[in-house]
Amino acid sequence: MVGRKRRKVKLLPARMVDDKTTTTTKNKKVKLETQTWSDLPIELLELILCHLSLEDNIRSSVACKRWNTAAISVRVVNQSPWLMYFPKFGNMYEFYDPAQRKTYSLELPELYGSRVCYTRDGWLLLYRPTTNRVFFFDPFSQEVVKLPRFELTYQIVAFSCAPTSNTCVVFTVRHVSPTIVAISTCHPGATEWVTVNYQNRLPFVSSIWNKIVFCNGFFYCLSLTGWLGVFDPMERTWNVLAVPPPKCPENFFAKNWWKGKFMSEHNGDILVIYTCCSENPIIFKLDQPKMVWREMKTLDGMTLFASFLSSHSRTDLPGMMRNSVYFSKVRFFGKRCISYSLDDCRYYPCKQCYDWGEQDPFENIWIEPPEDLSAFI
């Protein structure tokens, strides 16, 4: 009897283990059966939702609170600019979409013999050296808007808005001497350009490598040495701001430093990007009330698209493109744009040596894509 009891006592823990295992398995099964789509990890939700259209993204955001958070974090409202390539020969132009990593081609014989100067609102500003012809061109509608002939050597040129607007102003600044610049302006429908020489209050060096942005009704010009000049097209006044140039490490001013500098604007702010082949980029924002440059450690979700002749800014792009700078260079057989992530503090693809001196400044430029892609494909 005692032996049997002992055997029963020994068997009891085994039965208890079997019962516990069975209960655990049943609980796991019940838990799996009761899980819903709202229980998916937030990272997996974002990966799924980032492939939806804007309309489907909005619909999915009303499912629950977690889905709403995930949907908003990857919601795409704007289209990224496309990188337009100007061929050395022929009339076939390529457009690279960095968001989809796709390239489209379009034949544009109207641009033969022309040099790109600037782009804004989907319009190109071009110059034909053989005839001194200056004109606007929409590559997707093939619409042309001509301006009076004007000799543009290698000075920078920009315009305020689309030439279809009655407020469009074309602006160019040319270096005359260390203390004098010649500013020329024109507008669609004008019969001639207006040129006026202005005195600089501070040394201001102007050349093809200068940058121009139109912001808050003014043309801002960045000099080779980092000074900022401002032209008011309404009052026709020119002034060089008493703002010391952005402070960069000395190695940023090595070979081709003047080519690796870009300027853009966003919601009234002036932004400058300095690059160096051996260092990560440095981004500065002009603190206009205090008139000083502030280094930016984050873009707060914004995306910058930098090229030699004009740069752009965007918000509400795909999650992986946010808080980054996209440069006008493409690697991996034209399938991936070089970008720098401020979140990861690194270049993508993996940084090697990006020497801006090896690239022709007139080779490509960022441009607004068409609203209807099927219209020209």
Image (cartoon, rainbow, N blue to C red):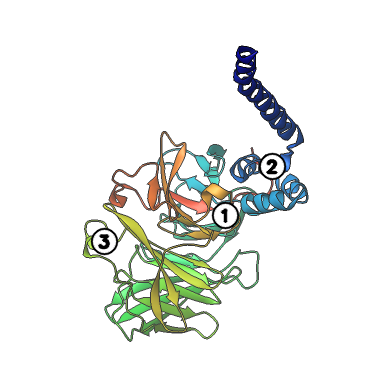
* Foreground tag (1 vs 2): 2
Name which quarter of the figure residue 166 lies in. Answer: bottom right
Front residue of 126 and 240: 240
Name which quarter of the figure residue 120 lies in. Answer: bottom right
Task: First in sequence, mark 3 or 2: give its number.
Answer: 2
Name which quarter of the figure residue 342 lies in. Answer: bottom left
Task: First in sequence, mark 1 or 2: give its number.
Answer: 2
Q: How far apart are marks 1 and 3 (CA)?
A: 36 Å
At x 44%, y 78%, the residue is 287
Apparent side of residue 193 relative to residue 294 in the rendered image (left or right): right
Say if mark 1 contacts mark 2, CB within 8 Å: no
Amino acid on which the number 3 mark rests in the picture = Phe
Amino acid on which the number 1 mark rests in the picture = Phe
Apparent side of residue 53 relative to residue 201 in the rendered image (left or right): right
Q: Distance between the residues labelled 1 and 2?
A: 51 Å
Residue matched to label 3: 252
- Residue 55 position in % (x across, y down): 75, 47
At x 63%, y 44%, the residue is 50
Which type of secondary structure does the marked residue at label 1 adopt? strand
- Residue 267 position in % (x across, y down): 56, 70
- Crowding near pointer 2: few (<14 within 10 Å), some, many (20+)? few
Front residue of 264 and 117: 264
Q: Mark number for residue 39? A: 2
Which type of secondary structure does the marked residue at label 2 adopt? helix
- Residue 256 position in % (x across, y down): 26, 56
Residue matched to label 1: 137
